[in-house]
């Protein structure tokens, strides 16, 4: 019972923290407007660890590597901690176990990214009908614009309705299936 509670807490707290780090990374990468409550919130809850790590791991070509590595590290801790609490005993060397958990943590970040994209596309589509001038609109637009533009160039609006979000969600769902398959293959290998 106590290990289930600990697994729940590790997965929830570190999962949310990893999500916050990943959102911060993408907001910096996509240059979303800083003066909004979401950006300020993400910076406030992650600055305590991002700023010291930036002294060790600098940015590279506009990529905030410190934030991305911290998100990966949080996922790594979740995977290894949960598996150890569930009684996982590494069969092979420690290096291959570390590599396996590291690869699975990277796959989990990719999966989280796809879910972020899908949720933002859905929220943006709903807000475009309900309240297109919402304070969230610039954030959502900066996240979804690069993806939706690919479809908007090829698929014209039908009866003045933009179908690009529908096709983007279908593509994200297909990519999620591929990621799940890769994740299972890696899990079986280690």
Image (spheres, rainbow, N blue to C red):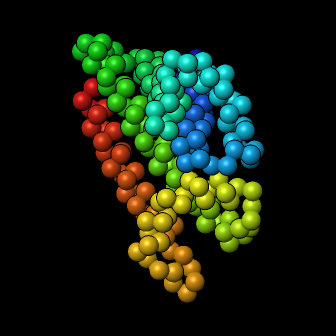
Q: Position of residue 128 (x, y in %)?
A: 66, 69
Query: Which residue of the protein is positioned furthest toward the front in this rendering?
Result: 61
- State which quadrant residue 136 falls in: bottom right
Q: Is residue 44 visible?
A: yes
Residue located 59% across and 47% down the image: 31
Q: Residue furthest top?
A: 94
Left or right, residue 90 beside residue 25: left
Q: Looking at the image, which residue is at 27% across and 38% down? A: 185
| Quarter occupied by the N terminus | top right
In the rendered view, does 143 fall on the left or right side of 35?
left
Locate residue 189, reporting x and y percent: 24, 30
**Quarter-of-image position of residue 53:** top right
Point 72% across, 37% down: residue: 41
Please give the count of numbered marks on the rendered protein.
Answer: 0
Q: Position of residue 68 (x, y in %)?
A: 49, 32
Residue 124 as seen in the image, left or right of residue 117: right
Which percent across, then down, holds residue 9?
A: 60, 25
């Amino acid at each position: 019972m106590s290990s289930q509670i600990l697994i729940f807490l590790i997965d929830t707290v570190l999962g949310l923290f990893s999500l916050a780090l990943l959102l911060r990374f993408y907001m910096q990468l996509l240059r979303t407007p800083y003066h909004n409550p979401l950006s300020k919130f993400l910076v406030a809850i992650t600055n305590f660890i991002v700023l010291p790590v930036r002294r060790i791991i600098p940015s590279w070509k506009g990529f905030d590597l410190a934030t991305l590595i911290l998100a990966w590290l949080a996922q790594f801790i979740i995977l290894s901690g949960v598996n150890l609490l569930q009684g996982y005993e590494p069969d092979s060397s420690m290096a291959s176990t570390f590599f396996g958990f590291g690869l699975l943590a990277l796959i989990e970040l990719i999966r989280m990214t796809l879910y972020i994209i899908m949720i933002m596309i859905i929220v943006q589509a709903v807000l475009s009908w309900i309240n297109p001038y919402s304070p969230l609109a610039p954030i959502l637009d900066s996240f979804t614009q690069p993806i939706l533009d690919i479809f908007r160039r090829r698929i014209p609006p039908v009866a003045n309705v933009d179908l690009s979000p529908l096709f983007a969600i279908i593509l994200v769902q297909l990519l999620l299936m591929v990621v799940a398959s890769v994740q299972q293959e890696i899990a079986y290998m280690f």
